[in-house]
Amino acid sequence: MVALLVQTGLFDSALSLCQTFKLSLTSVFEGLAFKCVRLQFGGEEAQNEAWSWLADNQLSSVVNTKESSATDEAWRLLASYLDRYPSSNGQNHRCVINKLLSHGAPLPDWLVKSYKAVDAASLLRLYLNFDLLEAAADLVLEYVDALLGRGHQYFGIERPLSATWSSVWLPYTSIDQLLQALTETQTNSCIYNKVRDKLDEYHRLVDQTSRRRLLAR
């Protein structure tokens, strides 16, 4: 029944049914993500058809104007569901991103931003799974900067690395995989050097922080 509701675009009903019977919401989020992909690459006919099923879902207000396309409204519906149905481990974000990347669709900025705050390490693994090395490198650079106190609020980090607070970590396994992948092609040497230099900066601060904590005891 959930599959049929998703297929016809009745996502509100599908989510309600899943909650009633304590079913996973994954299929609903994947189904809506796929519809967003089809609209992204579809033509005028797909846009016209989408207005019908969009109106069947209780989005705050479906905006059918020249300024807003059916694609925009479908993304807005997806964003509203991610806000209304949060998952403790970021599963809903993860399945949406995985679905989009598996179909070669670019990730919306708002989706990347919201998932970075939930589970940056998982986002890095997804980038690596789809060989998005440049995006993965950019994420590592941003994440290390966040640990160093530059933009930590965007990653859900309460306190960056300091002499009084050293409880921060890096997903070293994924970063090692990234560095290995970057070394396999000469075109990525510049990106490799940027990541390597940023990690060296982080390790220097970790060393300094550890020494200060030892001296303070």
Image (cartoon, grey):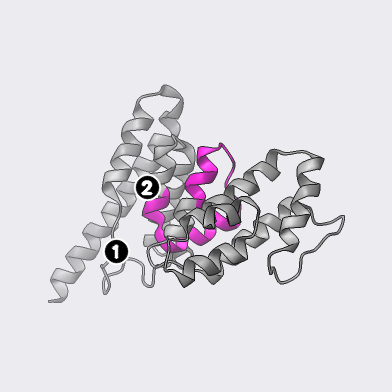
Q: Label 1 is placed on what type of residue? A: Val
Residue 6 located left or right of residue 94: right
131 and 141: which is toward the camera: 131
- Residue 163 appears in the picture as rendered: yes
Segment colored magenta? 96-123
Question: Local crowd at mark 1 within 10 Å, few (<14), some, or many (≥20)?
Answer: some
Residue at screen point 30% across, 47% down: 200
Quadrant position of residue 144 = bottom left
- In the rendered image of this protein, does residue 41 appear above or below residue 54? above
- Asked if residue 101 lies in the magenta stretch, the reply is yes
Residue ID for mark 1: 168
Q: Position of residue 26 (x, y in %)?
A: 46, 56
What type is the residue that disc 2 sits on?
Lys
Residue beneath disc 2? 198
Q: Does the magenta portion include 213?
A: no
Q: Residue at x 72, y 63 (%)?
A: 56
Report the front residue among 16 and 192: 16
Q: Residue at x 30, y 51 (%)?
A: 171
The answer to which of 204 and 161 lies nearer the viewer is 161
Measuring from the top left, give residue 161's x and y in whole percent: 32, 66
Q: Position of residue 129 (x, y in %)?
A: 40, 38
Judging from the image, what secondary structure is the residue with disc 1 in?
loop
Spatial CA span between label 2 and label 1: 16 Å
Depth check: 200 or 64 in front?
64
The answer to which of marks 2 and 1 sits earlier in the sequence is 1
Examine the rendered structure and indicate whether residue 156 appears above or below residue 54.
below
Category of crowding for the residue at label 2, using alpha-carbon neighbours closer than 10 angstroms: few (below 14), some (14–19), many (at least 20): some
x and y percentages locating residue 69 in the rendered image: 79, 53
Q: Residue furthest right?
A: 66
Tell me the SS state at disc 2. Answer: helix
38 displayed left or right of 194: right
Q: Nearer the viewer, mark 2 or mark 1?
A: 1
